Image (cartoon, rainbow, N blue to C red):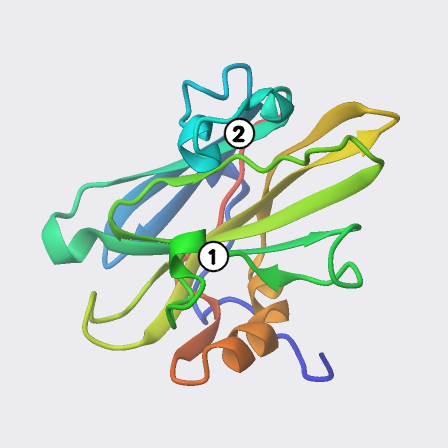
């Protein structure tokens, strides 16, 4: 990007014991406004496209092409209530069948013409994504997903990242393999700031993480 990548906020230390992984889940602990929180992210096979609503997206047409592709869910546990528990998820993706293999903003279709960086926003929102391709040609697809807040909850267009993770999939000779969720450091968030600021010039995006990111255990 041509500019130094700032680190996390002064006084915050990444503690390895706060990121917990197992073969199917990644758990990211964070602290915000003195309250502890936990993100639980999973990437699992799409074994039943109808059960997750794919037919709603296709107007009732067959949805079997989505079978076997990944389903990502990331939930937020945080004990605050109301406005104090408002978060947003923003996600950037890149794929070898996309625009020169560079990251792009990944809004849900409903928000494509809305000037918001958030794909999901609300009180402890869940990130849900189930990408697929109609043809199983060789390719790779990667997402960077970040949990964020606005410092005054819902009043200003100001984004501060809390924590993030990466996940994705690859197709090789029609076989689909998953990139299991893995924690991202603040430098990953900072690497997207030029894209975010250019895409949403009326918004402010702070560098670094507002919370320390942490890790324990592994698959």
| 140 relative to 190, above or below | above
Disc assigned to residue 71: 2
Say left or right for 54 vs 5. Answer: left
Disc assigned to residue 107: 1
Q: CA distance from mark 2 to mark 1?
A: 16 Å
The kind of secondary structure element at disc 2 is: strand
- Farthest top residue in view: 47
Disc assigned to residue 125: none
Q: Residue at x 50, y 15 (%)?
A: 48
Q: Earlier in the sequence, mark 2 or mark 1?
A: 2
| 154 relative to 50, above or below | below
Q: Residue 183: tell me if it is visible.
A: yes
| 64 relative to 74, above or below | above
Q: Residue at x 21, y 65 (%)?
A: 153
Where's residue 172, x and y in %? 85, 29
Q: Residue 180's quadrant in the figure?
A: top right
Q: Residue at x 42, y 24 (%)?
A: 52
Where's residue 102, x and y in %? 73, 63
| 45 relative to 84, above or below | above
Q: Residue 26: tell me if it is visible.
A: no
Asked if labels 1 and 2 touch by Cβ distance under 8 angstroms, the answer is no
Say left or right for 139 vs 129. Answer: right
* Observer-nearest of 167 and 112: 112
Q: Quadrant of the C terminus?
A: top right
Q: Residue 12's quadrant in the figure?
A: bottom left
* Observer-nearest of 192 and 19: 192
Give the label, 2 or 1, closer to the camera: 1
Where's residue 152, x and y in %? 20, 71
């Amino acid at each position: 990007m041509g500019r130094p990548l700032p680190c996390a906020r002064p006084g915050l230390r990444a503690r390895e014991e706060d990121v917990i992984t197992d073969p199917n889940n990644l758990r990211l602990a964070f602290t915000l406004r003195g309250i502890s929180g936990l993100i639980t992210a999973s990437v699992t096979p799409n074994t039943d496209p109808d059960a997750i609503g794919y037919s709603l997206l296709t107007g009732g047409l067959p949805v079997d092409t989505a079978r076997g592709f990944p389903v990502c869910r990331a939930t937020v546990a945080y004990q605050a209530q109301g406005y104090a528990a408002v978060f947003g998820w923003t996600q950037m993706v890149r794929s070898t069948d996309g625009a020169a293999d560079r990251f792009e903003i990944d809004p849900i279709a409903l928000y494509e013409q809305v000037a918001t960086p958030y794909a999901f926003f609300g009180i402890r929102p869940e990130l849900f994504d189930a990408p697929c391709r109609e043809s199983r040609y060789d390719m790779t697809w990667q997402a960077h997903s970040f949990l964020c807040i606005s410092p005054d909850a819902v009043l200003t267009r100001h984004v501060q990242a809390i924590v993030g993770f990466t996940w994705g999939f690859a197709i090789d000779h029609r076989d689909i393999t998953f990139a299991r969720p893995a924690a991202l450091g603040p430098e990953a968030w900072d690497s997207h700031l030029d894209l975010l600021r250019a895409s949403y010039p009326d918004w402010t995006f702070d560098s670094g993480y507002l919370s320390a990111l942490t890790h324990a255990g592994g698959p």
